Image: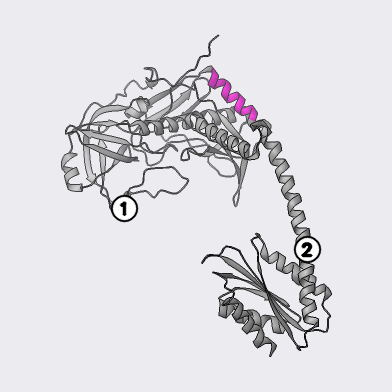
Amino acid sequence: MAAVITLYPTVTPLSYHRIVSPTLKIPTDTQRPIPVGLLACQRDPLLRKLETSIISCTLSQPASFPSVKKGKKASAPVPADQPTLEVILHDTIIFPEGGGQPSDTGIIKTADGRTWTVTQAKRHGGHAVHYVQVDQAEDSLASLTPGTNVVVALGELDFDRRCDHMSMHTSQHLLSAVLENRLNIHTLSWSLTAAPTPCYVELARSMTTEEILAIQSEANKLVFEGRKVHVEVQEMDDKQQPAVPVLESGRAVGKGVPTDYTGGIMRTVIIDGVDRNPCCGTHLPTLHNLQLFIIPQTETLSRSTTTSARLYFLSGPRLITYLTSTHSQLTAAAATLSCGAPQVPDRIEQVADERKRAEKRVDDLEFELAKFVARDVLQEMMSSEAALFVKHVHRTDDSVNPLGFLSAITTAFANIVPAERPFVLVFSSSPSSQTSTSASVLLVFGSDEKCVKPAGDVLKGKLNVKGGGKGTRWSGKFTGVWREGREDVVVSEVLKVIST
């Protein structure tokens, strides 16, 4: 039997949007905006173009611009010095940010052929406000006057963004419902992160790998069944809305209507036989092709009074991107390790073991080398007749811990030097390839801290060394190029002063 691939539907079924209140009608008065809850993007999430008209157009105030934080819900940034207009349309297919779902982006076209970029949309009270990026405010205000007929549309990238948001949002509803129905774990909050980062739900407790796999399997059974998704809308009555459930810790769970919403519409998203939840977001009309992948671990978060956990997940286009990227990384790793993809974990373990053994051999050899350096210094000291023996030893070292080797030298020297012989030694180390940002290290070691600290303080002042010490050891870091005829001379002068 040939394989059958179920693609996303290209047309939203007529049964998707259901008005369940006998008195509720979609407003037809083009002088008034349709409220959020009944927008075209919410009635028909697959619609890509709509003819509508302008209700109002005003110059946006700078305070209206939201800041875009890295890793948070993404909206196209607008330069602070570029004019932006706030446009309210009679109807729109550009979803305004809400329900945990970021704003759509899109375009507005006027009859004269001009195209205006909508960088984001937000809900103000009960209306959708489009933020339109323009070059000249006055000219744009003259073109986008109230009553003007326009076409609002989603371009290819805009629609890809919408599909990604719908996939992740519908998957979140599915995941939260299965978690609650099967394990009685409430979703405290969730984040629809910027693509392609995995989204997450925040839970009241962490989960075992077995629990995660069971939830993933249960959710995907519903996906493979192709459970339908539809929306029910009704007028919001004057009675106070049910309170969002609150746990013993005081943390609110579930979903409710925002307190600043004034659109008067109660909108509920239903996954057939699985879940029904108040939500203003856009959702796909079916679970088909929303295979859910849950990253098999939770990230525990500790707060002052509560502990929660994040469970990360992917689905739809974002899952495909994730799998493609992961496969590319695995293929590259296999090529680097000269093995097949299935052998990568074993090969990495082998390489890690070999590295540990190599590091152990390097440590052993450095310890032996430190002894030889210490003996050479001791031999020179024993042949010197100076009352206070001073010496500077500079090395070229590209290791990640050059100070560790210098410390090993001082330890080896301390084990063999006669207790009655006073000395002050300066060890320095710099990388073989130096730039203005290169870091060299210095270590001052002596028989008496009364000599060591003054030497360190003078080096700190003359070479701008950042460091300090206690007792008979002082260490620091020098940033810049270490030159034999300059920094070496400074160290020699300092030691000369100390020895007199």
The residue segment tinted magenta is 213-224
Q: Residue at x 31, y 33 (%)?
A: 35
Residue that carries the numbered disc 2 in the rendered image? 367
Q: Amino acid at mark 2?
A: Phe
**Image height check: is 411 above or below 157?**
below
| Quarter occupied by the N terminus | top right
Lower position in the chain sequence, tag 2 or tag 1: 1
For label 2, the crowd category at 10 Å Cα-Cα, with few meaning under 14, some 14 to 19 and many 20 or more, is some
**Image height check: is 196 above or below 425?**
above
Contact? badges 2 and 1 (CB < 8 Å): no
Total marks shown come to 2
Tell me, yes or no, if residue 72 can be seen here: yes
**Which quarter of the figure has residue 267?**
top left
Residue 23 screen position, x and y as percent: 31, 22
Residue that carries the numbered disc 1 in the rendered image? 80
Q: Secondary structure at mark 1?
A: loop
Residue 342 screen position, x and y as percent: 66, 31
